[in-house]
Image (tube, grey):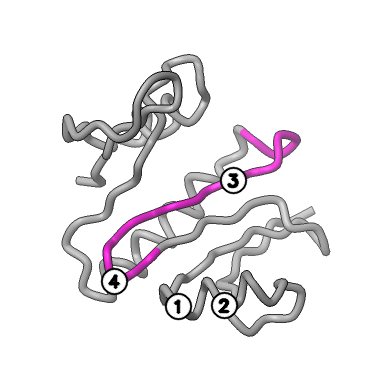
């Protein structure tokens, strides 16, 4: 089945009220990926800051380029909205798939550490 990608707006059906409120308050934009009627991935960004603050793909759909495409779409939109810095607070734990996901896509370390202990992260930037 073919994958479809689209942007979900704050008022779209299916989002809980608190989700719509958060989206409106921070002008969040979300890109989603669907396989038929099933949402298999999403990526959320805050255009005002250039932050990518969430990306997820169902485990059954990983390693198929879905996350990469969602990030690509988000980066295009962020650049188009005037962002000169696109960044993510990524995990520093090298046992996590997210650590390798960003590294494999060329995201650059900034040296800026967030949090402490096993939940610490690092700000990465898209060149």
User: From the viewer's perspective, is 17 left or right of 119?
Assistant: right
Secondary structure beneath label 4: loop
Residue range in magenta is 46-62
Point 59% across, 56% down: residue = 42
Instruction: State the mark number for residue 25.
Output: 1
Do tag 3 and tag 1 residues touch (Cβ < 8 Å)?
no
Secondary structure beneath label 3: strand
In which image quadrant can residue 105 be found? top left
70 above or below 64?
Answer: below
Q: Does the magenta run of residues contain 94?
A: no
Q: Nearer the viewer, residue 65 or 52?
A: 52
Can you give x and y, in whole percent of width and height, for residue 69 in the image?
Answer: 49, 52
Mark whose residue sits in front, 2 or 4: 2
In which image quadrant can residue 76 be found? bottom left
59 above or below 80?
Answer: above
Measured Cα–Cα span from mark 1 to mark 2 = 6 Å
Q: Residues within 10 Å of mark 1 (few under 14, many from 20)?
A: few
- Going from the N terminus, do you reach mark 3 or mark 1 first? 1
Q: Residues within 10 Å of mark 2 (few under 14, many from 20)?
A: some
Q: Does the magenta run of residues contain 52?
A: yes
Do tag 4 and tag 1 residues touch (Cβ < 8 Å)?
no
- Residue receiving disc 2: 21
Count of picture labels: 4
- Residue receiving disc 3: 56
Do tag 1 and tag 2 residues touch (Cβ < 8 Å)?
yes
Measured Cα–Cα span from mark 3 to mark 4 = 21 Å
Mark whose residue sits in front, 3 or 4: 4
Instruction: State the mark number for residue 48.
Output: 4
Instruction: State the mark number for residue 38.
Output: none
Point 48% across, 45% down: residue = 68
């Amino acid at each position: 089945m073919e994958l479809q990608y689209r942007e979900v707006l704050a008022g779209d059906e299916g989002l809980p009220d608190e989700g719509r409120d958060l989206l409106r308050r921070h002008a969040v934009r979300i890109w989603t990926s669907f396989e038929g009627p099933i949402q298999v991935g999403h990526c959320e960004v805050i255009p005002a800051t250039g932050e990518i603050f969430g990306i997820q793909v169902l485990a059954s759909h990983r390693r198929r380029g879905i996350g990469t495409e969602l990030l690509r779409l988000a980066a295009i939109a962020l650049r188009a909205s005037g962002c000169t810095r696109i960044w993510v607070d990524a995990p520093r734990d090298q046992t996590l798939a997210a650590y390798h996901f960003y590294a494999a896509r060329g995201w650059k370390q900034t040296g800026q550490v967030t949090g402490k202990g096993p939940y610490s992260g690092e700000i990465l930037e898209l060149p």
